Image (cartoon, rainbow, N blue to C red):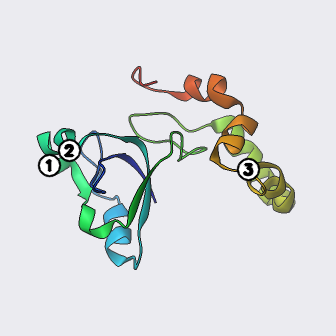
Amino acid sequence: MHGYVGDEYGNVQMPIIRDSDDIDTLFAMGSKRLFVTVERIVPHEVIMRHPLLTYIPHNLVEAIILAPYGAHPVACDGFYNADDQHMEEYVATAREGTMQQYLDHYIRGGDEWSYLNKVGGLECLTKLNVGGVA
């Protein structure tokens, strides 16, 4: 699961109040093992300043992993918008039945950073940022 900010204990917070239709907490509670990637890892003191923003508590999280732009190509509210151009490519490959080529090019044989470089690197990704978040 991808989250917004978390601390070293695995508490995950949204930087703003969440929508009532969000089901991440339900998925987290229903998981046997939960690994959460986040945009930022912050000190526990930051989490404790606004405890009501914690939507996934540490007792549900087995590990927390720093993964900037980890929600790409979809948006991460308050951090960056969806990459519409890449989403169009993704949808086209699904429609054309060429998903294996997409997976071979972007996903297989690499890591998160190789994927991010293939979609345009930090130069393109930072253009998706909102609210001055870099």
Real-space CA distance between mark 1 and mark 3, rounded to the nearest whole angstrom? 37 Å
Mark 1 vs 3: CB contact within 8 A:
no
Q: Which residue is mark 3?
A: 90
Identity, as a three-letter code, of the amino acid under mark 1 = Pro
Identity, as a three-letter code, of the amino acid under mark 2 = Ile
Mark 3 closeness class: few <14, some 14–19, many ≥20 residues within 10 Å: some
Mark nearest the camera among 3 and 2 is 2
Residue situated in front as seen by the camera: 37 or 133 = 37
Real-space CA distance between mark 1 and mark 2, rounded to the nearest whole angstrom? 6 Å
- Residue 109 position in % (x across, y down): 78, 55
Relative vertical location of residue 80 with respect to residue 88 in this rendering, above or below? above
* First in residue order: circle 1 vs circle 3: 1
Q: Circle 1 sits in a helix, a strand or a loop, which is it?
A: helix
- Residue 32 position in % (x across, y down): 40, 80
* Left or right of 66 in this view: 86: right
* First in residue order: circle 3 vs circle 2: 2
Mark 1 vs 2: CB contact within 8 A:
yes
